[in-house]
Amino acid sequence: MHPLPHDLPRSNAELFARSCAVIPGGVNSSIRAFKAVGGTPYIVERAEGPYVFDVEGTRYIDLVQSYGAIILGHAHPVVTAAITTAAAGGTSYGAPTPGELLLAEEISSRVPSCERVRLMNSGTEATSTAVRLARGFTGRDRIVIFHGNFHGATDALLAAGGSGVATLGLPGTAGVPASAVASTMVVPYNVVPQLDEQVAAVFVEPVAANMGVVAPAPGFLEGLRAECDRVGALLVFDEVITGFRLGTGGAQEMCGVSADLTTFGKVIGGGLPIGCVGGRRDIMETLSPLGPVFHAGTLAGNPLATAAGRAALGELTPAAYELLRGRAGRLSAVLTEACAAAGLPANFPVVGTLVGMYFGAALGDGVAPTNFAEAKTTDEAVYRSFFHAMLAEGVALAPGAYEALFVGLGHTDDVIDAIGAAAARAALAVVSSAAAATHAAG
């Protein structure tokens, strides 16, 4: 690791203020600014296994894990060795490499629906390309997405639902013109919409991991498959989070439903930037240079990212996934126990290796959300308090109430037990603080 300049402040607050002078909001991804939870972000200097260390030397047990990109643990020796070896031979060529072939073969072998694979640079690029490809292949324009699913910073998919149950999208952010989402329909998650012959594709997170982790209802994905087949639309699974996180074959293997196109990211890069679209041969060969749908990228198939991704996937055996599922269940159990003991209403649903978070009793004790409207009833103020209480106890959660908790191979049973002990103290602190505030107000 290259040492930081000797004159650089060893203070989170000073470094964040300095970043704000040259980077909008001081961050390069909005959630990192702590706007949803308040306070000043910790600035990470290094990481190892289940831990990150900030510039002040504070160690945190990390449940962010680069929002799912890290699964073996930070700085895993197999991955760092693969990156080091690859870097010694050059970092980018603008030409085909054996590494991109080998990674594509690995993905295709694990997910049978991915007969052909195209590598790129990010999950956003993958979903953007999938939109273009679906429209180019079908000759149709309309895209269907689900309220609360997140598919990256792609204009056509940054749509917000209107007041109706199923409406054409409204721009989900400033800078997205109405025309960009005029052909995007937003519908409730876990309800199979009725499609027509104008629909090019249905995009879905097979397990929704951007609203606190919501499982697909029985029959939901099967219903989407049947409805897409009925009208000739493509079913697109966004597995940027679930791909090779849930198991050897991702969500498709777990749910038993195959997609026409699948987008990947996160795990397949071993912590380096990457994205991927895979799918049926006839659809994928509509991409250039074989077909009329354009895609290109100077850094696509980058040799460092493909080396890191192959190294990570090589460690993800069926036994590793069994271990991860056990650890996810253990994490949920210790958090549930800690909050229950303190009298803090909370639910930590588990889907495979993913753990969600829900605070409050709006849905009833122990009831997990099934869609975005229900997920939005989580108590964000309680989450803010719990987030900071956990941070004070040395456990880093995502600075937003709708993210997943990512447990990895670096989170041993001892580490998870330490999280449980920290959560017990944090939950008591939240409840005590709320009681004190109520008493003072009274």
Image (cartoon, helix red, strand yellow):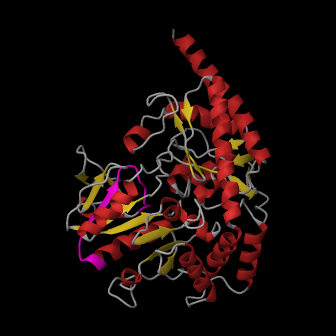
Q: Residue placed at 43% from the left, 56% from the top? A: 150
Q: Quadrant of residue 243?
A: bottom right
Question: Considering only vertical position in the picture, is 399 above or below 393?
Answer: below
Q: Quarter holding the N terminus?
A: bottom right
Q: Residue placed at 50% from the left, 76% from the top? A: 120
Question: Considering only vertical position in the picture, is 147 above or below 441?
Answer: below
Q: Quadrant of residue 340?
A: top right
- Pinpoint residue 414: horizontal percent, then vertical percent: 79, 45
Query: Is any atom of residue 408 visible in this view?
Result: no
Query: Of all residues shown, which one is farthest toward the left?
Result: 197
**Which segment is the magenta one?**
137-153
Q: Residue placed at 48% from the left, 38% from the top? A: 368
- Pinpoint residue 409: horizontal percent, then vertical percent: 72, 57
Q: Answer with left or right where residue 11 lies relative to residue 28.
A: right
Q: Residue placed at 45% from the left, 66% from the top? A: 124
Query: Is any atom of residue 106 visible in this view?
Result: yes
Q: Answer with left or right where residue 156 lies relative to residue 210.
A: left
- Pinpoint residue 162: horizontal percent, then vertical percent: 25, 47
32 or 8: nearer the eye? 32
Q: Answer with left or right where residue 1 lies relative to residue 190.
A: right
- Pinpoint residue 257: horizontal percent, then vertical percent: 44, 64
234 or 152: nearer the eye? 234
Q: Quadrant of residue 424?
A: top right
